[in-house]
């Protein structure tokens, strides 16, 4: 979806990243959108309303009780005008007010009056972002349908390195376009959701839509993680996110509500039929995002290639050459699939992937047990025609009950359908009795 002729309400709250909102506003205008800006009082400490008035050629909405030019109530008339509301940057304070339904200024009053899609781009210090209060507020907003553009990682205004940066305006625009397109397709999905329909996705893959996962919530991890050494370098792997996206499409095509938690991948890979997409950078952020979704989930598919290690203390400034070896101690990252597997509730199903270079079966079975999975898909990541980055995959699915199923090389969308077939079986009540191994 393009933003041309869309009417965008841009909310700006008071953080140092407010200056980036001016670039965002200008980029929205260049994309052909009409923009109206609403600011909090604190935001005006960082950037003058005149900047936005000049960029948008219209007044900024700032004060609930300012002298009116007309007898219109701005929060109502603006809410009626806008196609979407994006708050960027969204501070911890404004997120808390939005979550609690407090309407004590122009921005929060507009939020409560607005019935269209709302997108927030949080930006703040890492500790504030990771505080349980902020995390809870983000979960509350997300449950209410507010879409969250996850903050980036890097050096923050406070000098710390971590999560909390407002993503670049270009990234926000791409997310906004994708989210608005997703809203459309979700509406279309609802309109045409009938049982046992044959569907064809954008890659031309045909699959039976049997709604076997209707009413089920499936959380899927996907893509790589980036573990920063310094502000500009990170540890990662070649995962493209194609396998995770194919799984998301396959589960959605069977009627599931899919939450995709993805590491950094190209926006073009991201599926359009997920209920939510959570873009994260590091393993720790991926764990937090999955844990936040865990209570509501019926099943988890862990396709992400999570870095098992991170640098203990990322260096705050770019590491310089000195002619000497650089030693950076690595520590283990949390194992997301194991953390969820150990604590899964009765009836919840977990399926993992094993990216192997040798001894596929033995290594996969060890991971199946160690991570308390119900099934694991072993794929050979030394074969360039499958596994990382390629459009095809091949593997064997090992089930906890001892069964195994080989899936010969084929497009990832078809492999994903085979994995989802196993998920459908595992979610049947008959499979939820403990196997002999468990007892
Ligand atoms: O993204 P693509 O380019 O399409 O490539 C697909 C893929 C090769 C990445 C995918 O098919 C795959 O194999 N994913 C799992 C990669 C992996 O990390 O495997 P592993 O054997 O290291 O981990 C085993 C399982 O534990 C996986 O389900 C993994 O998501 C999970 N894990 C691993 C480490 C960790 N810290 N947390 C985890 O949850």
Image: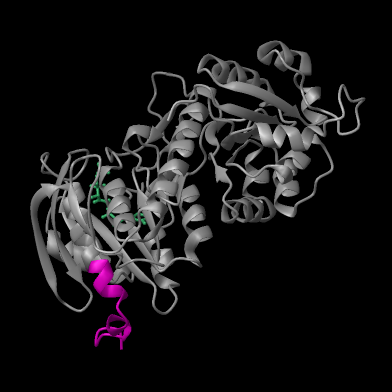
Quadrant of the snapshot with the N terminus: top left
Q: Is residue 400 visible?
A: yes
Location of residue 291 in the rendering, given as x and y in whole percent from the top left corner: 50, 60
Nearer to us in this view, 48 or 281: 48
Would you say residue 227 sits in the magenta stretch?
no
Q: Picture quarter containing residue 20?
A: top right
Q: Is residue 6 above or below residue 237?
A: above
Q: Is residue 213 left or right of residue 405?
A: right
| Residue 292: % across, % down | 53, 59
Q: Classify 177 as above or below 369.
A: above
> Which residue is at a point 55% across and 17% down the rendered structure image?
27
Q: Nearer the viewer, residue 308 or 216?
A: 216
- Residue 366: tell me if it is visible: no
Percent of width and height locating residue 226: 41, 38
Residue 427 magenta: yes
- The magenta-colored residue range is 422-439
Q: Can you say whether 367 is above or below 76 in the image?
A: below
**Residue 340 sits in which quadrant?**
bottom left
Q: Position of residue 318 (x, y in %)?
A: 49, 23
Q: Locate the C terminus by quadrant.
A: bottom left
Q: Give the colouring mode of the picture.
A: one colour
- Left or right position of 436 against 162: left
**Image point (45%, 34%), residue name:** 229
| In the depicted structure, whether residue 155 falls above or below residue 292 | above
Q: Is residue 173 left or right of residue 262?
A: right
Question: Front-most of 186 and 291?
Answer: 186
Q: Does residue 79 appear left or right of residue 161 in this picture?
A: right
Q: How many marks?
A: 0
């Amino acid at each position: 979806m393009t933003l041309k002729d869309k009417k965008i309400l841009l909310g700006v709250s008071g953080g140092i990243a407010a200056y980036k909102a001016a670039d965002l506003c200008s980029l929205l205008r260049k994309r052909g959108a009409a923009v109206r800006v609403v600011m909090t009082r604190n935001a005006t400490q960082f950037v003058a309303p005149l900047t936005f008035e000049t960029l948008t050629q219209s007044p900024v909405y700032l004060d609930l009780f300012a002298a009116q030019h007309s007898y219109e109530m701005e929060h109502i008339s603006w809410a009626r005008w806008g196609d979407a509301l994006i708050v960027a940057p969204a501070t911890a304070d404004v997120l808390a007010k939005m979550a609690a339904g407090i309407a004590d200024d122009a921005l929060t009053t507009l939020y409560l009056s607005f019935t269209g899609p709302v997108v927030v781009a949080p930006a703040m210090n890492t500790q504030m972002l990771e505080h349980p209060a902020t995390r809870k507020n983000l979960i509350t907003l997300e449950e209410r349908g507010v879409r969250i553009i996850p903050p980036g990682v890097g050096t923050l205004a406070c000098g710390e390195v971590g999560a909390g940066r407002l993503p670049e305006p270009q990234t926000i625009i791409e997310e906004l376009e994708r989210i608005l397109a997703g809203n459309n397709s979700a509406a279309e999905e609802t309109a045409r959701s009938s049982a046992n329909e044959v569907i064809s996705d954008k890659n031309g893959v045909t699959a039976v839509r049997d709604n076997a996962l209707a009413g089920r919530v499936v959380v899927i991890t996907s893509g790589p993680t980036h573990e920063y050494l310094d502000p500009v370098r990170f540890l990662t792997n070649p995962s493209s996110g194609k396998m995770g996206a194919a799984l998301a499409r396959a589960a959605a095509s069977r009627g599931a509500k899919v939450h995709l938690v993805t590491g950094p991948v190209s926006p073009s890979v991201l599926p359009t039929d997920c209920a939510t997409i959570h873009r994260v950078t590091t393993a720790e952020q991926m764990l937090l995002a999955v844990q936040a979704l865990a209570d509501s989930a019926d099943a988890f598919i862990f396709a992400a290639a999570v870095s098992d290690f991170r640098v203990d203390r990322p260096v705050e400034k770019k590491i310089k050459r000195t002619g000497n070896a650089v030693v950076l101690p690595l520590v283990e990252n949390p194992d997301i699939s194991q953390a969820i597997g150990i604590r899964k509730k009765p009836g919840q199903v977990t399926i993992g992937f094993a990216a192997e270079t040798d001894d596929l079966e033995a290594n996969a079975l060890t991971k199946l047990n160690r991570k308390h999975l119900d099934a694991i898909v072993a794929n050979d990541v030394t074969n360039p025609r499958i596994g990382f980055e390629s459009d095809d995959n091949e593997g064997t699915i090992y089930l906890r009950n001892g069964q195994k199923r080989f899936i010969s090389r084929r497009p990832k969308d078809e492999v994903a359908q085979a994995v989802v077939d196993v998920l459908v079986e595992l979610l049947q009540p008959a499979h939820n009795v403990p196997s002999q191994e468990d007892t």
